[in-house]
């Protein structure tokens, strides 16, 4: 059996008399582990070695296995591929309420509901029916006003009557009273959006191809931004549910940011949809899980972990915006939901649809190799056009502005933030009552502070990273550990009062904007404005209702938004991510710029995109301007061959971290030579070794960080080596030293 301990082994328990055998794999059982009650997951029967007394299982918790066979299979694959302990992996696949032996699963709250079962459409009928029953009439009218059903208790209070009134109404066959499980899902209150009625020929062609796919077939649905991928998903789901009587899983990058897409699924399938979002409480999550397990809902929509929805007979798994890096989990088990989705789908005999306007290189290459079928939606839906993109070289722009500047005029703060053409375009939108989106992928006010006299930059006391200046409230903040400290009046190094703010953040852009366009309604969307559970959705709903003229934000605003009145998208600084020390820097920038550009011109009014950059010749920017995915991919794939990076090799990042700088470095060096010896001893020629070296940010939250990289063109070899390192590589038990293996990392 598997127990949720960070150990690479399984455990054997005895089945005592009185418990029926065999216990199906995937069943939860209660056992004593390290003298504590724990929930274990049964994996199967084994023959115990002689001479060992086994502890007994205390109870079987499930009637039917909590993890059906396909999920157990997926869990084993994840544990194996990502070198994670199986017990921890299986636990992370179940709702918390089901894996804790201490807290009993919260009972689903049931409540007594009253429903109208006899319609009384005409006034005359009503007067006759309730001639001698005034209170019943009040209850009936109240019920009708609430959609025909309401909780008995709240009705009783509203009508100010006794419970006997309801019993009498039930006896007359007017209403039905029963206990119903109360759904606590806040998403249930949102109105769905109806999908467009008629798929285009291109959409229909894609749907046909997907439905004709063999079990386990992977499709890449490459549709330009605004091509109507959502309608393709909906039509596929409709066929899978209605004609084939199967179920479906839909993965989206982040529910809060994709509420528009989720509303469309709810509009099409109503209560068949369970929305699994991070705002759910443990009890709500359990409700949703159980309704899927019982087959009451047949579509699971959610981020990463919706992949583990306990559905049976899954017919299709859809991964929307498959290129998003949020599909990779950043803690154990470090799985990529796209890859795990393919494994689960194979086990279910389901087809997989990976949708994106800017596919990941991994998926693109998969299609090139024939392991996925590429389907293309080359045009925008309903005759809309891709927006023209203009590039402004900010180096030229600044030179010009400085030359033209009147030396006697007060300093113009918009200088260096907005080019002339972007300002003019924004102004036009305001005049015409149209909406604009502005992207700056850096939150805070300015990126850092620096002393003009000695050049000192305040850094976080816990991380190797400069502190970001925030204006409201005025603080220096670390974006890695949330450390905050007051803004220094004088330089900590040289005591000069010459501290200056450098670099641009969303707060500053917001301020500059509001001074320039005092009449504009501006909304800002970044981590700082969206801490509340529903904050994202509230901001997006306001944009949808036309209550916002300019939506300014970080990469959050680039994800899937579909607002027809947005006719301008401005990228304030396209270069923020280009120079990061990561082999995916260009790919990310291309995706971000293309995606945000794709928010413009979705309605009949068309739209424009203006991109400000200091690197107009980088291939990420050049190809984003022309919406040329193929061109970008060709160039980028070329760059990934020498030195080799994914998708041409499989990589694993081995991270060593600890509280002591010297010990961390020494451990990393020792671990690296341990691996090196392994490689030599086993003659593993197809394993390339890079490092060890300090990480690009070599200290986070007080922990020093070193890493080395393994590359191999043989995934199987990588699986073996990664697992061997995770399991066996010796790490001294001091200074909280830790070694983690991150297979297929999305950031280094
Ligand atoms: P994507 O996800 O591919 O960027 P969406 O699914 O958001 O695109 O669709 C873009 C817009 O086009 C949406 O407003 C959608 O309602 C509309 N749309 C999609 N398909 C059709 C169609 N066949 N007819 C009319 N409008 C459509
Ligand atoms: Zn910090």
Image (spheres, rainbow, N blue to C red):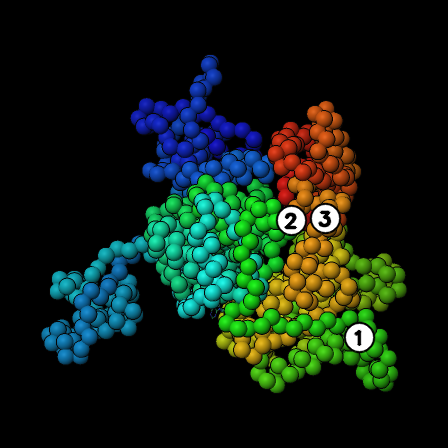
**94 relative to 191, above or below:** above
Q: Is mark 3 on a helix, strand or loop?
A: loop
Say left or right for 735 vs 341. Answer: right
In the rendering, which numbered label is found on residue 56? none
Front position among marks 3 and 1: 3
Closer to us: 166 or 251: 251
Q: Say if disc 2 is inside 8 Å of ligand 2.
A: no
List the residue tagged with mark 1: 397
Q: Say if disc 3 is inside 8 Å of ligand 1.
A: no
Q: Of callouts 2 and 3, which one flags the residue occurring earlier in the amino acid sequence?
A: 3
Q: Is mark 2 on a helix, strand or loop?
A: loop
The residue shown at (19%, 70%) is 119
Q: Are marks 3 and 1 in contact (CB under 8 Å)?
A: no
The residue shown at (65%, 65%) is 627
List the residue tagged with mark 2: 746
Q: Residues within 10 Å of mark 2 (few under 14, many from 20)?
A: some
Closer to us: 246 or 169: 246
Q: Of callouts 3 and 1, which one flags the residue occurring earlier in the amino acid sequence?
A: 1
In the rendering, which numbered label is found on residue 640? 3
Q: Where is residue 634 in the image (x, y as percent from the top left)?
A: 69, 54
Q: Distance between the residues labelled 2 and 3?
A: 15 Å
In this view, which residue lies farthest toward the top?
51
Q: Position of residue 150 (x, y in %)?
A: 28, 65
Q: How many marks?
A: 3
Say left or right for 555 vs 21. Answer: right
Q: What element carries label 1?
A: helix
Q: Where is residue 364 in the image (x, y as percent from the top left)?
A: 61, 51
Closer to us: 455 or 265: 265
Q: Distance between the residues labelled 1 and 2?
A: 35 Å
Q: Residues within 10 Å of mark 3 (few under 14, many from 20)?
A: some
Q: Residue 488: tell me if it is visible.
A: no
| Residue 29 image-quadrant placement | top left
């Amino acid at each position: 059996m598997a127990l949720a301990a960070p150990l690479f082994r399984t455990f054997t328990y005895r089945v005592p008399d009185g418990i029926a055998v065999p216990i199906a794999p995937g069943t939860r059982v209660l056992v004593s582990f390290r003298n504590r009650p724990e929930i274990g997951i049964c994996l199967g029967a084994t023959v115990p070695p002689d001479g060992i007394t086994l502890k007994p299982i205390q109870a079987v918790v499930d009637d039917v296995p909590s993890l059906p066979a396909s999920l157990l299979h997926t869990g084993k694959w994840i544990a194996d591929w990502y070198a994670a302990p199986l017990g921890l992996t299986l636990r992370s696949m179940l709702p918390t309420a089901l894996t804790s032996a201490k807290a009993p699963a919260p009972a689903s709250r049931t409540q007594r509901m009253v429903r109208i079962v006899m319609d009384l459409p005409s006034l005359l009928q009503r007067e006759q029916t309730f001639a001698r029953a005034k209170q019943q009439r009040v209850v009936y009218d109240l019920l009708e006003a609430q959609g025909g059903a309401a909780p008995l208790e709240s009705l009783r209070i509203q009508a100010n009557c006794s419970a006997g009134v309801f019993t009498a109404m039930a006896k007359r066959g007017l209403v039905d009273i029963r206990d119903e499980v109360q759904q606590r899902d806040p998403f249930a209150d949102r109105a769905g959006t109806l999908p467009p009625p008629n798929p285009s020929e291109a959409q229909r062609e894609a749907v046909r191809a997907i439905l004709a796919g063999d079990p386990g077939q992977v499709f890449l649905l490459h549709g330009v931004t605004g091509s109507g991928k959502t309608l393709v998903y909906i039509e596929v789901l409709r066929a899978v549910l209605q004609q084939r009587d199967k179920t479906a899983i839909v993965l989206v990058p982040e529910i809060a940011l994709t509420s528009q897409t989720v509303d469309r699924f709810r509009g099409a399938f109503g209560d068949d949809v369970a929305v699994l979002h991070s705002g759910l409480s443990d009890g709500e999550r359990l409700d949703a899980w159980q309704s899927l397990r019982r087959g009451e809902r047949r579509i699971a929509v959610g981020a990463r972990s919706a992949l583990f929805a306990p559905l049976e007979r899954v017919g299709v798994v859809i991964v929307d915006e498959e290129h998003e890096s949020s599909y990779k989990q950043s803690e154990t088990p470090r799985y990529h939901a796209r890859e795990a989705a393919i494994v689960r789908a194979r086990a279910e005999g389901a087809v997989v649809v990976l949708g994106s306007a800017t596919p990941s290189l991994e998926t693109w290459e998969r299609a090139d190799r024939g392991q996925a079928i590429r389907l293309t939606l080359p045009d925008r839906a309903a005759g809309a056009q891709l927006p023209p993109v203009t590039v402004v070289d900010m180096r030229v722009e600044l030179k010009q502005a400085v030359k033209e500047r009147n030396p006697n005029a007060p300093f113009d703060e918009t200088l260096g933030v907005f080019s002339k053409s972007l300002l003019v375009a924004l102004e036009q939108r305001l005049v015409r009552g149209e909406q604009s989106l502005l992207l700056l992928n850096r939150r805070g006010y300015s990126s850092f502070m620096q002393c003009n006299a000695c050049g000192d930059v305040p850094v976080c006391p816990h991380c190797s990273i400069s502190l970001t200046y925030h204006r409201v409230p005025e603080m220096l903040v670390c974006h890695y550990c949330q450390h905050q400290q007051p803004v220094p009046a004088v330089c900590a190094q040289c005591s000069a009062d010459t501290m200056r703010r450098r670099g641009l953040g969303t707060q500053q852009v917001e301020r500059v904007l509001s001074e320039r366009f005092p009449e504009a309604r501006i909304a800002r969307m970044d981590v700082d404005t969206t801490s509340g559970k529903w904050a994202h959705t509230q901001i997006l709903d306001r944009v949808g209702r036309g209550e916002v003229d300019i939506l300014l934000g970080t990469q959050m605003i680039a994800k899937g938004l579909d607002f027809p009145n947005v006719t301008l998208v401005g990228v304030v600084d396209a270069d923020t991510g280009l120079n990061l020390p990561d082999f995916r820097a260009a790919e990310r920038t291309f995706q971000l710029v293309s995606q945000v550009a794709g928010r413009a011109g979705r309605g009949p009014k068309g739209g424009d995109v203006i991109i400000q950059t200091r690197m107009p010749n980088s291939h990420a920017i050049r190809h984003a301007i022309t919406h040329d995915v193929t061109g970008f991919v060709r160039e980028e794939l070329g760059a990934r061959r020498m030195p080799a990076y994914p998708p041409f090799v499989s990589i694993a990042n081995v991270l060593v971290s600890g509280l002591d700088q010297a010990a961390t470095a020494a451990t990393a060096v020792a671990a690296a030579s341990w691996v090196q010896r392994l490689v030599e001893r086993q003659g593993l020629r197809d394993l390339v070794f890079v490092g060890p070296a300090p990480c690009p940010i070599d200290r986070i939250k007080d922990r020093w960080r070193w890493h080395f990289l393994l590359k191999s063109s043989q995934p199987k070899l990588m699986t073996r080596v990664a697992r061997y390192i995770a399991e066996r590589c010796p790490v001294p038990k001091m200074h909280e030293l830790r070694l983690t293996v991150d297979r297929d990392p999305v950031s280094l």
